[in-house]
Image (cartoon, rainbow, N blue to C red):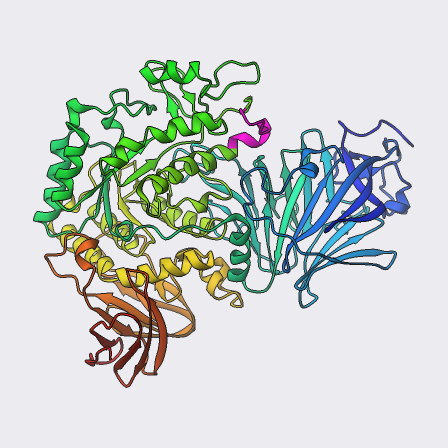
Amino acid sequence: MNGPAGDGGAYVLRHVTDVTLVGDVVRFGVAALPAVELPGTPGWLTGEALTDQGVEVTMPNLPAHLELPGVTPERFEVAVSLAAPDVARIVIARPRARVHHEDASWLGIVTRPGGVEPELTDDDTWVTVAGADIRVRVRRSPFAVRVLDGAGRTVLRTAERLRQVAGFPMAPPVLAEPGTTTLQLELDTDEDVLGFGEQFGRLVKNGQQLRLRVDDALGTGTGMAYKPVPVWHSTAGYTGLFNTGAEVNADVGHVRPSVLSLRVADEAIDLYVLAGPDPKDRLAAYTGLTGRAPVPPLWAFGYWMGRCRYHSRQEMEAVARGMREHRVPCDVLHLDPDWLVVDRLNTDFVWNTDRFGERRELVTALEDLGCRLSVWEVPYLDPVSPRYREAEEHGYLVTRADGGVAHVAGTPTPDGRHRALVDFTNADARVWWQRMHDEFLDDGVAVFKTDFGEGLPDDVAPADGTPANHAHNLYPLRYNAAVSERIGSRTGRNPLVWGRSGWAGSHRYPGQWAGDAESTVAGMQATVRGGLSYALSAPGFWSHDIGGFYGPELTPELYVRWTQLGALSPLMRAHGLRPREPWEFGERALSIARDWVRLRYSLLPYLWNSATESAARGLPMLRPLALEFPDDPVCPGLDDEFLLGADLLVVPVFDDGPGPVRRRFYVPDGRWVDLLTGDAWTGPGFHTVDVALERMPVLVRAGAVIPRVDVDADVRRTDDLVGRAWTLHVAGAGDVRTELTGFDGTVTTVTVVAGEAHASGTQPVRAEVHRLDAPAMPGHWR
């Protein structure tokens, strides 16, 4: 029955041939056999005897003639090591594959590979590589993999036992085909899978098929993603990370309902498995491997305003004055591409003095009005720019494999000319690009919006030798890193960018925003889902365009609902093709939006403390309920509400009418109190309320302390709140103890007893204590 030597060169890993311990890495030699996919029926077969493969040969409708491949094996190596006591790395590839000969940080995703000496045991059937809180078990024959947590629970298993009626294996554990390697895992009966970056569909990915490739997604409803991340969470108790820049196709029980099939467009699987029951602990371990975001500057947590586009200095100053005249606090004004002379999908740092005058004078004028300046950029160059020839002559541009200059792909250019890309793997090109930011930073530009970055074509030859199949998805990581690091080194403060594209590791360079959402209720809903999904894969500081970027005329009511969402998001920016200033939507919208902007500013102490915790622990500020309540079976499916930090439950209202709106939402276990009304809710369970346009439910967890600051009509920006007394809003009647980090970084321990706050810290600060569900009770630090 032996036929051709595999269908297109497909191989299935079948039998462990040898096991060796080399340093702290256990290396398995594995015989992979040629395999064929059955025509017209699901299943894969090797040339081995059918009974050895578990095929039911007594089936009456078994095909009589199966063209099976030969049985000449190909050697693969599986390397298992421990990056931490609860983190295993599993590398699967042919011995010659580059991944076997590189440090784990070679792609720039993993920054701290770590290493723990494993304990190795062998019972002739299973070989076990064990750490304190994780065990990887490899079966000798037929090849299979299990991962167990510290309690001995199986959290991950390959899918070899899943078969169709005739016993043909449907999901071989590891399938190597030309140009791809597929890992296939068995989904447990109640296992949910979440993550994979900023995906705009449902938070639980079961039943979905996802293409993890950085794209100019052209909105939030196209099925593409600006920031896909090959990181996922399983409710079985593990988090997976593919240490790769290659495209990944994740089939989460879509074709085969019980299989998580992960196809990597590469010769290797490089998988990190982080085990443990608490997803917050796993995220901490993940960011321990890949790095953590610094806390952005305090002003970053204020209100940002932008438009595509402001066309002149006069227009920007008018907006800044409008913020002051309408008593709307605002910290940042954003300037899109009109600041450039050549401004269409190009950044050459040639400032347009005709439109905006001298840059330093613009910065000073806006500063006098209370606003900092944000400036747009892309990593692309137009051939008509005077910088293009310089970059080309010095070899600063990405080239194709044939040596020609590579052209931006995926985004149409308005004039038909190609755009070139800066090669950030070339050290000289990177420094050249970074230095062009210096005069802007010296003039007081506060932040750069690092737009685009999704356009690297596939047939490229990066200067540092990064394989072409990894380069596309890694490009935005390297682009944002270059800009972020220059801001930090030039200014001496924690850097901040405003990035659209991203990949694994991009969370190190805050912040990111959700791209170009449609100005509809569906666009708002997709935005929230994208943020929640991204939070589980790239924890840090994320935001979105209030009002959406494009589409139908934005109703005043949807603008208000989106502003409420933005006010309770990690970072807050209004931006779109058309005006987004609140006075553009009528008096009622202006009044309500102003109240919510001021509410955000009053919560600046809470936002600051949540950001400090997020940076220290590697957690997102915007949190799916499943992250805080992993044992609640309802929470994984909740993607229309979220936690901001650990203690504020935010319930956006997805509606574009004048209201009131009936809103059904879930309250997790415990007692929760509305921050604004004092209404109390008890969970777990669903509740339904009628919500007027002026309202959005914002609930505080019982026992939480929410530090706030008074915001009067004279507050222009966050700077005006530094030094003001904090008011402690306490949910519930019990005594509480907490630690609070001041805007200057000092930590104060606070105990609230009988309405009085007792503090021990470096700075005595006067404050008041308010019980959220009781009359205000005066108190003070002492």
In percent of width and height, residue 429 lies at: 44, 25
Instruction: Identify whether 419 is placed above or below 339.
Output: above
Q: How many marks?
A: 0
Quadrant that contains the N terminus: top right
- Residue 99 found in image quarter: top right
Residue extending farthest to the bottom is: 754
Q: From the viewer's perspective, is 100 left or right of 598? A: right
Q: Quadrant of the C terminus?
A: bottom left
471 is within the stretch colored magenta: yes
Frontmost residue, 498 versus 695: 498
Residues drawn in magenta: 462-472
Residue 515 horizontal/vertical position (percent): 37, 39
> Which residue appears at 27% of the width and 72% of the height?
729
Q: Residue at x 38, y 16 (%)?
A: 390
Residue 628 position, x and y percent, is 46, 64
Please say whether residue 236 is visible from this viewpoint. Answer: yes
Q: Residue furthest left?
A: 325
Identified at 34% across, 50% down, the residue is 296
Whole-percent x, y for residue 657 in the image? 24, 51
Residue 550 occupies which quadrant of the picture? top left
Location of residue 492 with respect to 360 vertically, above or below: below
Does any portion of residue 498 appear in the rendered image?
Answer: no
402 lies left or right of 774: right
> Closer to the camera, 669 or 164?
669
Residue sitting at x 89%, y 42%: 50
- Would you say residue 497 sits in the magenta stretch? no
User: Of 41 and 631, which appears nearest the observer?
Assistant: 631
Asked if residue 285 lies left or right of residue 77, the reply is left
